[in-house]
Amino acid sequence: AQSVTQLGSHVSVSEGALVLLRCNYSSSVPPYLFWYVQYPNQGLQLLLKYTTGATLVKGINGFEAEFKKSETSFHLTKPSAHMSDAAEYFCAVSGSGANSKLTFGKGITLSVRP
Amino acid sequence: DGGITQSPKYLFRKEGQNVTLSCEQNLNHDAMYWYRQDPGQGLRLIYYSQIVNDFQKGDIAEGYSVSREKKESFPLTVTSAQKNPTAFYLCASSRIEGANYGYTFGSGTRLTVV
């Protein structure tokens, strides 16, 4: 079984400030981890993913995330927020075989203040 | 370009009516999924299919039905038994082998009961 916890439902930052969106996971097998972004009335778009190898993963739009096995975390960061980053962000986990379906967190809404 | 197409983008249903949401993909993906999204509740899995002519219930299948007659198509019917159908519906697809590829999402259908 696997699960994802995204603490809090809303994060607000000022334009130019650091963005940090937290994600903790639980998985009985080595996990594959994903971050998706959703803009209003649109589908989800893949930001980045961790499968194997380097634990610091770089994605689109300047986002990156670090897989920390000891902390069971996969937090998403961006050094400087832009107004266009305002959206909902979902963390997801999958395993292999019978655990290959994605399990999503409840999502976090990011607001960016001018 | 390959992708997933959901139609219509907006759909209105009268009480007691069945409506069908379309989902078509040209990615040659084996697996397809339907999710329901409500504010603050994240994504909830309705049905999924890993192969033609076979599908499984997700977490909230009551009041919904699906078919998978072709690899490319996975339509969702919202029946009159679904008492609270107003929501945003997302279709997704994935390669069946390798959980590390993640899902590709359509742009969604917003269903409103009038």
Image: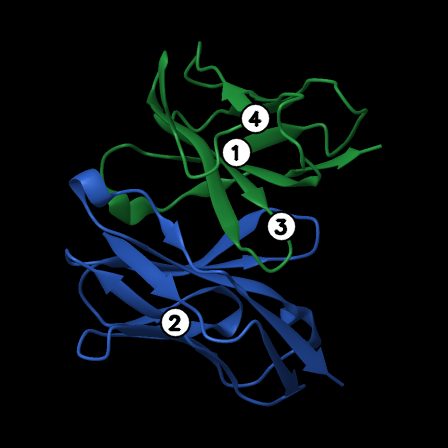
Amino acid identity at mark 1: Gly
Q: CA distance from mark 1 to mark 4?
A: 28 Å
Which comes sooner in the sequence, label 1 or label 4?
1
Q: CA distance from mark 4 to mark 3?
A: 16 Å
Q: In the displayed structure, does residue B10 sit left or right of residue B104?
A: right
Q: CA distance from mark 1 to mark 3?
A: 24 Å
Chain letter corresponding to the colour green: B
Which residue is identified by label 1? B3
Establish if B92 lies above or below A64.
above
* Secondary structure at numbered mark 1: loop
Residue at image x 23%, y 79%?
A71
Of all chains, the one bearing label 2 is A
Residue B22 percent across, percent down from the top left: 61, 22
Which residue is identified by label 2? A23
Which label number is shown at residue B63? 4
Residue B16 percent across, percent down from the top left: 75, 20
Which label number is shown at residue B38? 3
Amino acid identity at mark 4: Gly
Amino acid identity at mark 3: Asp
Q: Residue furthest left?
A: A29
